[in-house]
Image (cartoon, helix red, strand yellow):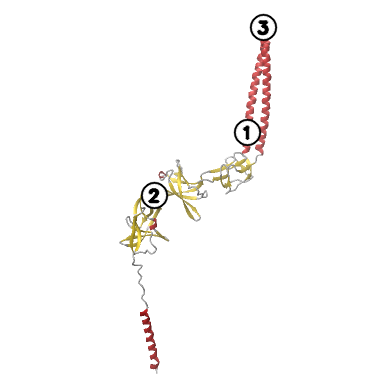
Amino acid sequence: MTTAIHRPARVFTTVVLGTTLLAGCNRPAKEPVATQSRPVSVRVATATTLERPERFEAGGVVAAAETAVVSSRVVAVVTAVAVRPGDRVRAGDVLVRLDTREMAARVQQANATTRAAEEALVAARSTQAAAAAEQTLATAWHTRIAQLRERRAATAQEFDEAAARLAAATARVTAAQAGVEQASAQLAALRAGGEVAAITESYALIRAPFDGEVTERLTDPGNLAMPGQALLRIDGTGQRRVDVGVDEARAAYVRPGDRVAVLIERGGGEDALAGTVVEVGRAIAANERAFTVKVALPAGSVPRTGTFARVRFNGAPRRALVVPTSAVRVQGHLTSVFVVSQGVARIRLVQTGDTDGDGTEILAGLDDGESVVVEPPADLTDGRAVTIAISSAAGG
């Protein structure tokens, strides 16, 4: 009974296994994976030792080529400030108004004294004319008396009186001339004083010296403005520059006209600009032992003044191992290159330095003369066989 029940189960199992094996024999075999054994065509370059200048950086701030600190020339109360930081102004625009009452009173006083001096000059000239007329009469009288004296028709006393009268008239003419000159000088002085008063009154309107942007407001209405006290700061809208300090040992390698790289922080990153050294200070700061170097930024770039910037200069020449920049791969914190040796690509971790038009400097991990893969393909892996399509040297 038990044997009759279990026998069909064994037959069913045997059929299933046979069917499975038959199906396996009829299924096509998987194709072999040949991508790992097939060589990859790559371009290589030779790591080369080149003569490169040492790079060094100096920090500074962005400044405008034109900067003005606006202050008053007179002591007066500020009545109005027409601008705020960020406002654009044109040359001649009124920025600050001062109290003009005292200055206007001085102008009126100067005008009044000038008119009085003009009247005094007129009176002095009238006195001079009267003295000249009296001198003419005294001269004629003296001439007649002298003629009569020659004919013995006039006494000695009459002749003496005529001579004295002529001398007095001449003295009055001289005094009148001096009075006219004095009145003229006084009038000129008062007119000059009036011009000074008018010019001083014009100082009550403080105007923009050039086209620019107000960067700082340092006063408000009601404050007392004094000569030399800053009221506003204005930066010109023209070219920007970066002022940096270069230490004495490296300043010898910086010259006007040098092209340098300027890195400006912006939006969490850095903008790289091409700057030009326009001025190298000759005086050394006693406390810093550094030269002030001014670097002009390219036209059209207007970074905010006061922004921190780093300037990269070229220093003393040195020898450096260089590979093409496209041969360097950066994955996270790891930097590597593919080195080709005996037809096989091997990955090599390296430490890099500066990068410029000649390529990227390799500080460690690579030797001179080794071949590296330029622009490695995406399917290139460590140990993969390669064929060289093009070979070149770094920088060429």
Depth check, front residue: 40 or 72: 40
Query: Helix or strand or loop: what does disc 3 sit on?
Result: helix
Residue sitting at 69 percent across and 9 percent down? 158
User: Would you name the residue on which mark 2 appears?
Assistant: 54
Q: Residue 355 in the image: x percent, y percent?
A: 40, 53
Q: Earlier in the sequence, mark 1 or mark 2?
A: 2
- Left or right, residue 264 beside residue 348: right
Amino acid type assigned to the residue bearing label 2 in the image: Glu
Label number found at residue 195:
1
Q: Is residue 321 above or below residue 186?
A: below
Residue sitting at 63 percent across and 31 percent down? 191
Depth check, front residue: 71 or 223: 71
Q: Is residue 152 above or below residue 139?
A: above
Q: Residue 376 in the image: x percent, y percent?
A: 38, 60
Query: Helix or strand or loop: what does disc 1 sit on?
Result: helix
Amino acid type assigned to the residue bearing label 3 in the image: Arg
- The reply to whether discs 1 and 2 touch (Cβ–Cβ < 8 Å) is no
Q: CA distance from mark 3 to mark 1?
A: 59 Å
* Other residues around mark 1 within 10 Å, as few (<14) / some (14–19) / many (≥20): some
Query: Helix or strand or loop: what does disc 2 sit on?
Result: strand
Q: CA distance from mark 1 to mark 2?
A: 62 Å
Q: Residue 127 in the image: x percent, y percent?
A: 68, 21
Q: Residue 271 in the image: x percent, y percent?
A: 47, 53
Residue sitting at 48 percent across and 50 percent down? 309
User: Would you name the residue on which mark 3 appears?
Assistant: 149
Q: Residue furthest bottom?
A: 1
